[in-house]
Image (cartoon, grey):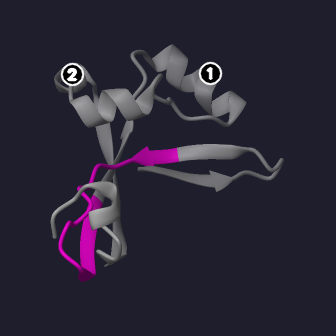
Amino acid sequence: MTCCSPDFLGREIVKGYGVINVPTQPGIHERTVQIFSPLTSSVFLNFLGILAGQKAEMINAPKVISSGEGREITRTRSEGFIKVIFNVTTRDMEKFGYNV
């Protein structure tokens, strides 16, 4: 999950990343996702990011976040929490090869 918001020029700026598993049981499910953002590797790069108006972003974020490979050496900062509500249905699952 990537949290974005537009800046004053209309560009989307990544505010943070989070990981959550989609529930497999039918019904309404409420989950809380912790959002984090990567930190730059140096003070100079942080200063350049402030001047450009952009935070540090992950390259190939979906693969890095979902696999977990290399995440233990990534410096991050907590950005807060987001509440996500899932409405899960299992209609016509047999058509796609799932046994419900």
User: How far across and how far down the image is residue 97, in percent?
Assistant: 26, 55
Q: Is residue 12 above or below residue 74?
A: below
**Residue at 26 percent of width and 78 percent of height:** 30
Q: Camera-side residue: 3 or 67? A: 67
Q: Decide whether residue 23 is among the magenta residues.
A: yes
**Could you tell me residue 90's position as x and y percent?**
29, 74
In the drawing, does residue 15 fall left or right of residue 34? Answer: right
The picture places residue 35, in percent across and down from the top left corner, at 34, 53
Q: Dot 1, how many residues are within 10 Å of its Cα: few (below 14), some (14-19), or many (20+)? A: few
Three-letter amino acid code at disc 1? Leu
Q: Which mark is residue 35?
A: none
Q: Which residue is mark 2?
A: 69
Which residue in the structure is indicated by mark 1? 48
Mark 1 → mark 2, Cα distance in angstroms = 28 Å
Judged left or right of residue 93, residue 38 is right
CA neighbours of label 2 inside 10 A, class few (<14), some (14 to 19), many (20+): few
Q: Nearer the viewer, residue 61 or 15?
A: 61
Query: From the viewer's perspective, is 62 left or right of 90?
Result: right
Residue at left offset 22%, top offset 66%: 23
Query: Mark 1 touching mark 2, by CB under 8 A?
Result: no
Secondary structure found at label 1: helix
Residue 3 image point, x, y percent: 49, 53
Question: Is the residue 31 above or below the residue 14 in the image?
Answer: below
Sequence-first tag of 1 and 2: 1
- Give the magenta-colored segment's residue range: 15-33
Type of amino acid at the residue the image marks with label 2: Glu
Q: Residue furthest bottom?
A: 28
